[in-house]
Image (cartoon, coloured by chain):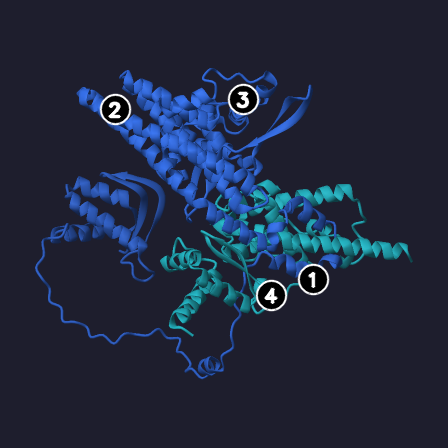
């Protein structure tokens, strides 16, 4: 009997039906997870006209999908990578959308998922719950997407609730969902339904990422504050259960890998690719579970030590204050006279230690007696090297071109438009290289410093479109 | 003294130097990362490091993957001095800057739950314009709830929100920069100082300046600023209550 069979048997094997009073709150919370997406879609008209042709719910789910996929490979996804990936989808929904507008659309979706409008606080959804025969209003708070910086770089990651929402396993316990995925996966492999199995393995991978995030969340909470988690009562039992669960997963994943290996022997050519994809996905789950298991084994002494340390710090015993309601708003109601003694403390609380400047008599004397620096920039004493001209290929302009340009300028006197001179050169069948040299000469004189121009050149305020040249026309002030 | 211990002391001093530079992180500096690793693995190293810090009257706020976070103890050589922030400020200017520091923290961490998140989770980008609107909004609520004679008395007896509401929202200098005399100018100054200390990341000039709090800012607020400023406000409140009682008792 496989381990998952045992687990299902232990649970009574059949469908577990909770009494409706118990099931209802969990079902409602499940439903509420989608609220931010619906709200984003229903209010899109107020934000940007370009959003009307977009289904923001679809884009939001695609953002989550792309982010979860990258979470499997590392910390998460760079915002820019996600934007680049989703922009083509937004442009498919509205082919008239420019790249800039498409980026703005994706930014709006990401900001919506981060709850940027509410300063990234958790989404708060009120719901009615039936308790002790009466109806009580409660609030469900959750995040879907987070921006975080574990190593100086900034990443996006989908939260546990977000993965729940995305994978469509709403209302299921993560551990149960993992077991269910594996049962389905084994069944699909045994029946040769490999393309379905690849999809199931992908979901299983998302589950393992979600489970990883859940366990890391528990450990981080314990590390942050000993008062939040009762280590001996809650955390240790949760860690024990997690270890058992992971050992079961590793065992089943080994069985699945064996089944995949077996399948290779009888596989057709087109099935081999699918089997390889499957193997890679299951392997990634195994690696993640092994790392998590290693962490859970080592966690006890580390965290007990951490708790001991926190126990000795003064702030560990104080609950965190509400900066806005308990500090800032009351402070506004004091007079300047009352606050003046505390101002230094208030600013200093936000300043890391400032190393004092140490007095050094030696350094002071050295600085005071240092020779006065001359303001003139130093000139390097370098000898001018002897240079000889070397033979080179002919340049783009010949001596004839230079003669032609001189002739053209001699032919004109006073103010004349460059376009007119070019037209004249064309009429006289002068080569294109001559015309180019004329244009370059005009531009050189236009940009020359005062007194260095051969003849003054200024903007004519008209467009030049003559003899294959385009741009602003110039007026040449050629001396007679 | 053994040579080994002398080496440990040298390296502990080196770690302290890294910890005091707000722009150094273990992710950028391999040496800092190695020293942090030593801190986690060697109890002797940790003890020496903590003893040196104690001797210098430096408080260790937190050990984190982002580095060691410190604070100068009151009246110690590393304690904060107002001149480190801005010299020559008048009393009401100091008060306004203190309040704006609180306002920025309140804007970044609107609830206890948000403050209590993991250090790695980033708070939203914020602009000078947004915080100015947030501060003005709250001061206007104070004005509505506590109508007072705007002409009354000297600045000393004016309420903090009155002083803030009396500031122009924005004002340009001759060079086209934001004047420090305006609310936006003061906020810009405060955010720039936080950025200098590695607590904010400057992103762009958009909306008078766009910044994002770093994980170090959360650690600073969580481990020190929150508790310290709460204590200040609580003691002010107690003083005010005692003064009222004295007045009532004649």
Q: Secondary structure at mark 1?
A: helix
- Give the label, 4 or 3, closer to the camera: 3
Q: Is the residue marked by circle 3 packed among few (<14), some (14-19), or many (20+) residues within 10 Å? A: few
CA gap between label 4 and label 1 equals 15 Å
The colour with which the image depicts chain A is blue
Q: Is residue A268 above or below residue A315?
A: above
Counting labels gives 4
Q: Nearer the viewer, mark 4 or mark 1?
A: 4
User: Which of the two marks, 1 or 3, is nearer to us in this view?
Assistant: 3
Alpha carbon separation for disc pair 1 and 2 = 73 Å
Residue under pointer 2: A274
Instruction: Return the mark for residue A31.
Output: 3
Apparent side of residue B173 relative to residue A439 in the rendered image (left or right): right
Q: Which residue is mark 4?
A: B81
Q: Which mark is residue B91?
A: 1
Marks 1 and 3 sit apart, C-alpha to C-alpha, by 54 Å
- A343 lies above or below B146: below
Q: Nearer the viewer, residue B181 or B155?
A: B155
Mark 4 element type:
loop
Q: Chain of mark 4?
A: B
State whether residue B125 appears in this view: no
Q: Is residue A51 visible?
A: yes
Question: What hue does chain B carry in this figure?
Answer: cyan
Q: Nearer the viewer, residue A464 or A269?
A: A269
Numbered disc 3: secondary structure? helix
Query: Are the residues under marks 1 and 3 on the same chain?
Result: no
Is the same chain shared between marks 4 and 3?
Answer: no
């Amino acid at each position: 009997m496989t381990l998952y069979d045992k687990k299902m048997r232990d649970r009574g094997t059949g469908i577990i039906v909770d009494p409706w009073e118990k099931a209802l709150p969990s079902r409602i919370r499940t439903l509420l997870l989608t609220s931010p997406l619906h709200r984003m879609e229903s209010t899109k008209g107020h934000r940007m006209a370009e959003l009307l042709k977009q289904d923001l719910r679809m884009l939001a789910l695609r953002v989550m999908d792309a982010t979860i996929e990258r979470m499997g490979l590392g910390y998460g996804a760079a915002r820019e990578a996600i934007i680049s990936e989703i922009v083509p989808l937004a442009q498919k929904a509205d082919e008239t959308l420019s790249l800039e507008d498409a980026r703005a659309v994706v930014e709006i979706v990401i900001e919506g998922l981060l709850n940027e409008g509410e300063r990234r606080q958790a989404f708060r959804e009120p719901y009615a719950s039936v308790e002790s025969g009466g109806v009580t209003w409660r609030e469900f708070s959750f995040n879907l997407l987070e921006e975080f910086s574990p190593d100086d770089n900034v990443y996006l990651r989908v939260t546990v609730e977000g993965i729940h929402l995305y994978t469509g396993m709403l209302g299921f316990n993560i551990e149960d969902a993992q077991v269910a995925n594996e049962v389905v996966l084994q069944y699909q492999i045994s029946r040769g339904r490999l393309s379905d199995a690849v999809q199931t393995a992908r979901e299983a991978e998302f589950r393992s990422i979600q489970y990883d995030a859940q366990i890391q969340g528990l450990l981080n909470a314990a590390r942050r504050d000993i008062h939040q988690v009762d280590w001996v009562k809650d955390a240790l039992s949760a860690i024990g259960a997690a270890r058992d669960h992971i050992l079961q997963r590793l065992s089943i994943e080994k069985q699945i890998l064996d089944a995949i290996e077996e399948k290779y022997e009888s596989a057709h050519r087109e099935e081999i690719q699918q089997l390889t994809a499957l193997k890679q996905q299951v392997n990634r789950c195994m690696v993640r579970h092994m790392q998590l298991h290693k962490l859970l084994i080592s966690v006890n002494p580390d965290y007990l030590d951490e708790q001991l340390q926190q126990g000795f710090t003064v702030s560990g015993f104080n609950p965190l204050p509400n900066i806005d309601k308990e500090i800032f708003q009351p402070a506004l109601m004091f007079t300047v006279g009352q606050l003046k003694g505390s101002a230094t403390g208030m600013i200093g609380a936000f300043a890391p230690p400032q190393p004092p400047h140490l007095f050094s008599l030696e350094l002071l004397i050295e600085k005071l007696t240092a020779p006065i620096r001359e303001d003139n920039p130093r000139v390097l004493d370098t000898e001018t090297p002897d240079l000889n001209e070397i033979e080179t290929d002919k340049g783009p302009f010949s001596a004839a071109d230079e003669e032609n340009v001189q002739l053209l300028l001699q032919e004109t006197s006073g103010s004349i438009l460059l376009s007119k001179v070019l037209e004249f050169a064309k009429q006289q069948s002068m080569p294109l290289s001559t015309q180019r040299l004329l244009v370059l000469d005009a531009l050189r004189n236009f940009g020359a410093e005062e007194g260095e121009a051969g003849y003054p050149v200024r903007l004519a305020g008209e467009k030049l479109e003559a003899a294959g040249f385009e741009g602003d026309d110039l007026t040449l002030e050629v001396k007679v | 003294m053994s040579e080994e211990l002398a080496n440990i002391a040298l390296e502990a001093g080196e770690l302290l130097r890294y910890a005091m530079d707000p722009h150094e992180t273990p992710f950028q500096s391999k040496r800092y990362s190695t020293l942090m690793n030593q801190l986690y693995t060697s109890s002797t190293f940790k003890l020496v490091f903590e003893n040196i810090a104690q001797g210098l009257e430096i408080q260790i706020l937190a050990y984190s993957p982002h580095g060691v976070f410190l604070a100068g103890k009151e009246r110690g050589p590393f304690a904060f001095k107002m001149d480190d922030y801005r010299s020559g400020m008048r009393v009401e200017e100091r008060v306004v800057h203190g309040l704006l520091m609180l306002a920025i923290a309140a804007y970044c961490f609107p609830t206890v739950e948000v403050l209590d998140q993991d250090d790695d989770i980033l708070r939203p980008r914020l602009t000078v314009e947004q915080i100015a609107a947030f501060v003005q909004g709250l001061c206007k609520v104070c004005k509505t709830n506590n109508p007072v004679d705007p002409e009354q008395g000297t600045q000393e007896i004016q309420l903090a929100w009155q002083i803030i509401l009396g500031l122009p929202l924005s004002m340009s200098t001759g060079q086209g920069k934001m004047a420090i005399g305006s609310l936006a100018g003061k906020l810009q100054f405060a955010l720039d100082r936080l950025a200098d200390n590695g607590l904010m990341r400057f992103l762009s000039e958009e909306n008078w300046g766009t910044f994002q709090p770093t994980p170090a800012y959360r650690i600073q607020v969580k481990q020190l600023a929150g508790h310290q400023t709460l204590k200040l406000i609580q003691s002010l409140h107690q003083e005010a209550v005692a003064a009222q009682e004295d007045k009532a008792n004649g």
